[in-house]
Amino acid sequence: MQHINLSFFVDMGGSLALLKMFAKREVDIPLIEAWPPIGDLLDKLTRLGEGYPVQVETSSGPALDLLRELRGIRERHFDAPSGDLDFNKNWNTNVVPAWEFVVLSLDRFQTVLTAEFTNSATFSVPQRWGYRTPTLIVNAASCAGLDRRGDFQGTPLLDLNEAGKCLAFEMPTASGFHAARAVEAILRRYYEALIGPLPDRAPMGTLVETLEQASKKKGAARPDQRTIRTLREIKDLDRNPLAHPEATLDMLSAKALFELAGIAIWRMLKEIDEHHAGSPIQQAQPAA
């Protein structure tokens, strides 16, 4: 996935339009007026040749031809012998002959670029509910306030971010799969902190069952039943169906799972912190 800076092409179009306008003039163009679009296109064509902001194919040849032509204008009219811009010249009185813009391959480059973009695989990702699209794609963990937690890093963080990205690109089943993985990774850490070593076989259901039993015991620090209820909901309603190849999620279910995952992870990490700090785990709430 690659972010495309659309303003790059808006600015490029403006510079191309100015040079075309210069080609229609009957008078020569002062350096001070000619340099902005020339300098802008020299920079943009160079970057386009390097693959920024997109990798062009059929346009690469015309882009290189136009780049060479513009470099020739720069060398003839703007550069000092050192190769740098010559600011000792009077840029108000020195000019670029109008005919030099006439012979530039502006139309050829623009025509080929337009044709290539017409058939390019460019898509727009709409906003999903109240989530900002760039946030879902780049930093979805921030939607649950988990992006800056030092204890939420590595694979679980990557999975929750992937869940948000899949949600943005309307891949609900993939989103649910990554959200469930993130929860299960923190669940194992949560179990070890509050119960002890993981059993040899530790599917999510077994861990949740043991934690649920421990949450009902009296007198000792124990898992919060609100956390266990959230984990049970994730397991029963989402995690189990996702284990079957024929199962799929719709967008609303994927959104719910993404949000439940953030809540469950936040609660588990909070309880782990409290346990490690030596403070009592919040007493379990009466079962509903």
Image (cartoon, rainbow, N blue to C red):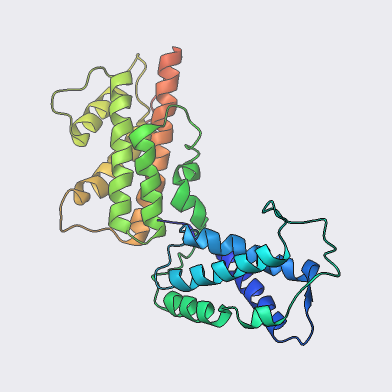
Quadrant where the N terminus sits is bottom left
Q: Is residue 13 visible?
A: yes
> Residue 195's x, y, as percent?
27, 19
Q: Is residue 288 visible?
A: no
Foreground residue, 240 or 214?
A: 240
In the image as oriented, which residue stretches furthest toward the top?
A: 278
> Residue 62's x, y, as percent?
48, 74
Foreground residue, 132 or 188?
A: 132
Identify the residue shown where x is 22% and y is 35%. Answer: 204
Identify the residue shown where x is 36% and y is 55%. Answer: 166
Residue 15 in which image quadrant:
bottom right
Identify the residue shown where x is 40% and y is 73%. Answer: 58
Does residue 233 lie above or below 22 as drawn?
Answer: above
Foreground residue, 81 or 260?
A: 81
> Residue 124's x, y, as percent?
46, 67
> Residue 240's x, y, as percent?
20, 46
Foreground residue, 188 or 48?
A: 48
In the image as oriented, which residue stretches furthest toward the left?
A: 201
Does residue 224 lie above or below 109 as drawn?
Answer: above
